[in-house]
Image (tube, rainbow, N blue to C red):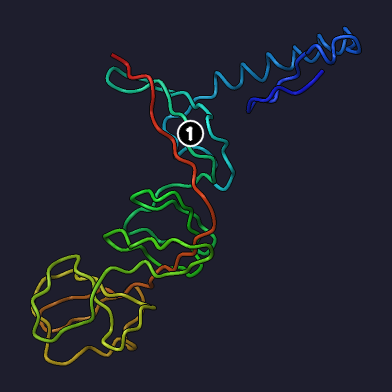
Amino acid sequence: MEKSNGGLELDIVTNNTFDNDDIKETIVGYGKNFSTIEKYLTEAIEKPEDLPTGQVIEGGKIIWNKNPVIGGYVGWVNIREGLNAPSWKPKVNYTVGQEIKAKPDNGNIYRCVTAGKSMVHSPTFLVGEGVEFYDANGNKWFPNYNYQVNDVIFAVNGSKLYYYICETAGITGTSEPIWSSVLPSSTVVDGSVVWRKEATVKWKQVGISSEFRPFGKVE
């Protein structure tokens, strides 16, 4: 018997193997094929994000929707072979080693190399093998400036190890706060603004991401 060329790699009888194939082995092989096909057809989840992360998923893999509804879809098909990981999310504490896919999707997987908390808005995901960058969207602090809730700033010296997110809108003071005296995840008052200090995540591109798209709309 030979292996089929598809992703399931089923055991099949061909003209090249027919004369040498043992009947018992053929029957057992086809029994295994049915088990493989049954598992393939019955594998169902609520959403692609429920798949295990960190594994390579072949292109063309189909996952069935565990709870299809009218207006929804019967399943998803992977259109790009690559690593599976959840999409980037805002205000999440990421630890070293966690992997995400860019949002919006750019076809790549990124691994956290410096722990921290993601920002409100998605960063610019750089592209290049092994490239590293901060999860950073913000400007340097300005004096006497009107800031709104969720605005993000960095220290005037340009350091991006930490960022400061506005929790209470207002106008900053005339002098920059002494950021080094502020503990991570704690707040500091700056004029009428209240900032919260958070560690900035650093990402590293580590590979290509899978990409599932829905199919079979339920009318």
Is 128 positioned to the left or the right of 69 in the image?
right
Nearer to me, 128 or 169:
128
Vertical order, 185 against 204 (above or below): below
Nearer to me, 97 or 129:
129
Vertical order, 57 against 120 (above or below): above
Which residue is pictured at 22% across the width and 75% down the height?
A: 195
Label 1 environment density (alpha carbons within 10 Å; few <14, some 14–19, many ≥20): some
**Dividing the image into 4 quarters, which one contains the N terminus?**
top right
Which residue is pictured at 54% across the width and 46% down the height?
A: 83
Asked which quadrant contains residue 35, the reply is top right
Asked which quadrant contains residue 159, the reply is bottom left
User: Helix or strand or loop: what does disc 1 sit on?
Assistant: strand
Vertical order, 26 against 109 (above or below): above
Asked which quadrant contains residue 125, the reply is bottom left
Q: Residue furthest bottom?
A: 175
**Residue that label 1 marks:** 78
Which residue is pictured at 28% across the width and 68% down the height?
A: 137
